[in-house]
Image (cartoon, rainbow, N blue to C red):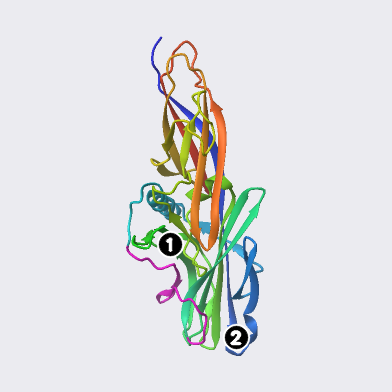
């Protein structure tokens, strides 16, 4: 009999990341009646957003390399309280034109004779799954004129520690989507761009690992300090002699180490867990418990349990490498 390490998948979940975009030019005199007050929802709360019509959005391309940076940097901070603290712009849209590039940088308010991009968020919950939608509204209400060949959307994520003495953390501002779109803005017209980025059907227990993009509503994740009693991102192991629950006393470990990589039109996030099985143990019950506090959003907690059995015949397994895998699938 020999000791053999094994890699076992505890859970494999897919989060779809979708993007849609459109550009509209209007005559200047249409400005006052073009924008509409649209009701957006953050769970059971509604708020007004001044936006162009949201119909006829066209498919774009998700930049997987940019998405991978967001996932990696966000989880680095949320699992180990380490990373950058330099402030990053919430959003930027870069227009490639015949004369170079036109940057539309973050500007909370749409007004005449200005350029910018503002960000609205919408959050839904259904059957213990969450969907986060981000509406990026780009605008150019100046006298400029140009013809475009490509649009690029740059975004960033932010989070903080649940204590005002600690700094706010920001990811890099990275390209998350682009579109080969051609249109002409004339000096007597205004330009509006609607860009929707959506993280769909996220299981409740995985929400803490999904980057929260900067937004006008001020919703962001808050890293809990160790003196908080509520469990967060913990893995419990049932030894048969303990209370096997998120508030129980079974042996446990923090979910801290992870790897990210791009594969098959997806960004893969893996959390490996080393499990000591002991002689004669053929299976282990595992309980994953997660909890994250948010600014302007209720705490989101979840859990999932499973039993793993090392797939070995004729050998004693003393160590198993179990992984929790989240696939961010771009479309």
Query: In the displayed image of the protein, which residue is found farthest to the bottom?
Result: 29
| Image-based side of 75 in relation to 14, left or right | left
Q: Earlier in the sequence, mark 1 or mark 2?
A: 2
The local secondary structure at tag 1 comes to: loop
Give the x, y percent position of residue 46.
Answer: 64, 68
In the depicted view, which residue is nearer to us: 248 or 94? 248
Give the x, y percent position of residue 10.
Answer: 52, 32
Boundaries of the magenta span: 86-113
The quarter holding residue 125 reads bottom right
Give the x, y percent position of residue 237.
Answer: 48, 29
Q: Is residue 300 above or below residue 114?
A: above
Q: Based on the picture, tell me whether residue 87 belongs to the magenta stretch.
A: yes
Q: How far, Cα to Cα, is label 1 from label 2?
A: 29 Å
Q: Is residue 122 visible?
A: yes
Q: Based on the picture, tell me whether residue 96 belongs to the magenta stretch.
A: yes
Quickly name the residue at label 2.
31
Q: Is residue 141 above or below residue 180?
A: below
Q: Is residue 57 above or below residue 308?
A: below
Quickly name the residue at label 1.
156
Mark linked to residue 206:
none
| Image-based side of 105 in relation to 125, left or right | left
Q: Nearer the viewer, mark 1 or mark 2?
A: 1
Q: Residue at x 42, y 33 (%)?
A: 273
Q: Residue at x 46, y 71 (%)?
A: 95
The local secondary structure at tag 2 comes to: helix
Q: Residues within 10 Å of mark 2 (few under 14, many from 20)?
A: some
- Labelled pair 1, 2 in contact (Cβ < 8 Å): no
Q: Residues within 10 Å of mark 1 (few under 14, many from 20)?
A: many
Give the x, y percent position of residue 211.
Answer: 47, 55
């Amino acid at each position: 009999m020999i000791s053999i390490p094994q890699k076992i998948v505890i859970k494999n979940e897919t989060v779809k990341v979708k993007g849609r975009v459109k550009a509209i030019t209007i005559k200047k005199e249409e400005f006052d009646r073009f924008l509409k007050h649209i009701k957006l929802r953050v769970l059971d709360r509604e708020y007004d957003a001044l936006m162009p019509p949201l119909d006829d959005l066209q498919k774009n391309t998700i930049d997987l390399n940019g998405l991978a940076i967001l996932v990696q940097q966000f989880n680095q901070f949320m699992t180990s309280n380490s990373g950058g603290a330099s402030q990053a712009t919430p959003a930027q849209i870069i227009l490639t034109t015949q004369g170079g590039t036109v940057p539309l940088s973050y500007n909370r308010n749409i007004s005449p004779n200005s350029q910018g991009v503002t960000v609205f968020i919408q959050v839904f919950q259904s059957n213990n799954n969450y969907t986060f939608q981000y509406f990026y509204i780009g605008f150019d209400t100046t006298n400029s004129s140009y013809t475009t060949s490509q649009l690029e959307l740059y975004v960033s994520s932010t989070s903080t520690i649940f204590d005002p003495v600690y700094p706010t953390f920001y990811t890099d501002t990275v390209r998350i989507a682009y579109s080969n779109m051609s249109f002409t803005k004339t000096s007597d017209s205004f330009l509006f761009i609607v860009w929707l980025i959506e993280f769909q059907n996220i299981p409740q227990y995985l929400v803490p690992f999904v980057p929260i993009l900067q937004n006008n509503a001020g919703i962001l994740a808050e890293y809990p300090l160790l003196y908080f009693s509520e469990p967060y991102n913990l893995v419990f192991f049932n030894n048969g002699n303990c209370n096997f629950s998120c508030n129980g006393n079974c042996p446990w470990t923090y979910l801290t180490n992870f790897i990210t990589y791009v594969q098959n039109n997806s960004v893969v996030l893996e959390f490996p867990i080393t499990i000591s099985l002991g002689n004669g143990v053929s299976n282990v019950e595992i309980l994953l418990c997660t909890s994250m506090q948010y600014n302007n959003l209720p705490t989101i907690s979840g859990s999932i349990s499973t039993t793993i059995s090392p797939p070995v015949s004729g050998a004693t397994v003393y160590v198993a490498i179990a992984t929790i895998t989240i696939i961010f699938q771009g479309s």
